[in-house]
Image: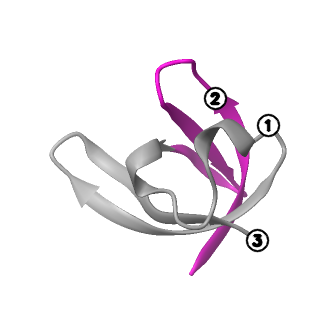
Amino acid sequence: MNEGTIARLTDRGFGFIAREGEKDLFFHSNELQGVQYSDLKVGDKVTFEVTEGPKGLSATKVSRA
């Protein structure tokens, strides 16, 4: 499991996770586990898995740490 912090959230149901020393990672609200999108805030610590998709790397199985 990887760890990061919520860097940005949009009003369209997706956001980005900041990872130390690496490029921010896209995530979609469909990939959240145990937390609602509306409950997330910038700066929240999260755990996730990294998956290769058609548009590059993204975070899946995202949950609050």
Q: Position of residue 34 (x, y in %)?
A: 60, 67
Image x and y of residue 37, in percent: 60, 42
Q: Who is closer to the viewer here, 63 or 51?
A: 63
User: Which residue is pictured at 56% across the width and 45% down the height?
Assistant: 23
> Is 61 situated above or below 20?
below
Q: Residues within 10 Å of mark 3 (few under 14, many from 20)?
A: few
Amino acid at the residue labelled 1: Val
The residue under the point 42% across, 56% down is 31
Quadrant location of the N terminus in the rendered image: bottom right
Q: For the residue marked with disc 2, what is the amino acid?
A: Leu
Of pointers 1 and 2, the one earlier in the residue sequence = 2
Which residue corresponds to mark 2? 9
Which residue has dot 1 on it? 42
Residue 65's mark? 3
Do tag 1 and tag 3 residues touch (Cβ < 8 Å)?
Answer: no
Inspect this view and state whether residue 28 appears: no
Q: Is residue 12 above or below residue 7?
A: above
**Residue 53 placement, left or right of 46:** left
Secondary element type, mark 1: loop
User: Please, which residue is most extreme toward the right here?
Assistant: 43
Q: Residue at x 58, y 22 (%)?
A: 10
Read off the magenta span. 1-25
Crowding near the residue tagged with mark 1, few <14, some 14–19, many ≥20 C-alpha atoms within 10 Å: few
* Label 1 close to label 2 by CB (< 8 Å): yes
Q: Determine the residue positioned at 48% across, 30% down.
A: 13
